[in-house]
Amino acid sequence: MKTITTFLFLFLITFSPAIATPVCSSSTTVKPLSGFSFFRVHRQGSGISLSWASSSSGVVQFIIERSYDGEFFDVIGGIGCTGTNTHRLSDNNVFPGIIHYRVTAVRADGTTESSAIETVRFVRRG
């Protein structure tokens, strides 16, 4: 029985590349969005302030992501496009350490692109 299971597993991987290919590989191969004029991250009080400007058209929402290891990002917020090019967000729920941020733009057609990753060192709260 173990031999049949192993054979089926190898057969599926060999002849079905969709099963062997990871679906969410975007965390390691992020293409920076060329439509960002700037993306800045800095400490402000007991939190982190993020600001960016976008000249890209067709963007309906920005998704802000945070990571403590630079590889796996968690969504911390989202901002809809309001017609202005400059956007701001404060992240007041941070822990000490090196923190990485990126902004992902969601276009009306469903495509997404991410900014370059910005890093800030947060020493202590307060």
Image (tube, rainbow, N blue to C red):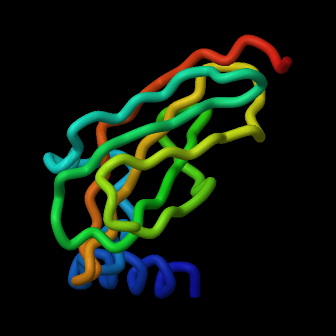
108 or 86, nearer to the observer: 86
Q: Residue at x 77, y 29 (%)?
A: 95
Location of residue 56 in the rendering, given as x and y in whole percent from the top left corner: 17, 58
Locate residue 98 relative to residue 108 in the image: left or right.
Answer: right
Q: Determine the residue positioned at 26% across, 58% down.
A: 113
Q: Tell which of 39 and 31 is nearer to you.
A: 39
Question: Count of labels shown?
Answer: 0
From the viewer's perspective, tell me whether residue 73 is left or right of residue 13. right
The percent coordinates of residue 2 (x first, y second) are 57, 80
Give the x, y percent position of residue 104. 37, 56
Where does the N terminus fall, quadrant-wise?
bottom right
**Left or right of residue 45: residue 63:** left
Report whether 4 appears left or right of 37. right
Q: Residue at coordinates 54% horizontally, 20% vertically from top-left?
A: 120
For residue 30, above or below residue 107: above
Q: Up-down: is 94 above or below 77?
A: above
Viewer-side residue, 99 vs 39: 39
Residue lying farthest to the top in this orientation:
123
**For the point 68% across and 20% down, which residue is it?**
97
Q: Residue furthest right?
A: 126
Which quadrant is the C terminus positioned in? top right
| Percent x, y of residue 93 | 77, 40
The answer to which quarter of the image holds residue 106 is: bottom left
